[in-house]
Image (tube, rainbow, N blue to C red):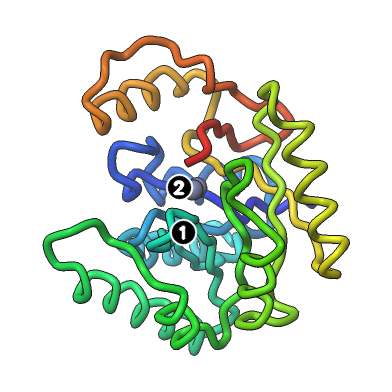
Amino acid sequence: MFVHLHVHSHFSFKDATPSPLQLAQRAKDLGMSALAITDHNTLAGAIRFYQACLRHDVKPIIGCEITLDTGHHLVLLAMNIAGYSNLCRLVTAMYLANPSKKTEASLALVEEHSRDLICLTACAQPQAITHAFLTNLKGIFFDRLYVELENHRTQESPRLLRQLAQLAQELELPLVATNNVHFLSPADHRCRDILVAMGSLTPCIPCASMKTTTGSSISHTVRTY
Ligand SMILES: [Zn+2]
Ligand SMILES: [Zn+2]
């Protein structure tokens, strides 16, 4: 059974539509045995997601997609209660370090709180995931680092996916496929577009870079940033 490991709820403000409860319900309806929650720089939805998953007999995987000060994103997944605790400390430290600015973490801060966390390389921009960057991450997460492949079905996708797979092979890193879920069903895609337009203060016109994926039941993603 495929398990979604990169999933946003509406606690990823102006970026995703489902509530944590709806995500858990959808996983249950689709017969999924486990589901992750990985909102941007917050664990605000984690407890209600955890409780809803337990009610539906779905294994909750608590995580967070954090923003690095280099602009990279990382998906961090708690392996156990100690990992969850580290994740809470990391996110808190990110906010305290930048009270009035963008919430982001240095790699050093991530390293400080990296125990019992699994790291996925998240949404990759071409040229952003380099050999050097992955080497640094491997030095922090060791065998808990996975190169993430998201197929956005854009013109760029085949080349980017090949490039990431090649890097993973060179560094002997395992691959993981995700869908960077931002809404529950294709019908919600337009609603998500409107949220993103609100967040970026831009007119809401269909964006060429937004393509709904079809390979996965819950989900849809679409934008890499
Ligand atoms: Zn991202
Ligand atoms: Zn994401």
Give the vertical position of 13 relative to 148 (above or below): above
Q: Quadrant of residue 33?
A: bottom right
Give the vertical position of 19 relative to 174 (above or below): above
Q: Amino acid at mark 2?
A: His
Which residue is disc 2 drawn over? 8
Secondary structure state at the residue bearing disc 1? strand
Q: Residue at x 81, y 65 (%)?
A: 174
Which residue is disc 1 drawn over? 65
Q: Are marks 1 and 2 in contact (CB under 8 Å)?
A: yes
Beta carbon at label 2 within 8 Å of ligand 2: yes
Secondary structure state at the residue bearing disc 2? loop
Q: Decide which of 134, 99 is in the foreground and name it.
A: 134
Residue 213 spot, x, y in % from top left: 65, 27
Mark 1, Cα crowd under 10 Å, few <14 / some 14-19 / many 20+, is many
Mark 2, Cα crowd under 10 Å, few <14 / some 14-19 / many 20+, is many
Residue 193 spot, x, y in % from top left: 39, 22
Residue 137 spot, x, y in % from top left: 62, 73
Residue 115 spot, x, y in % from top left: 55, 88
Q: Which mark is residue 13?
A: none
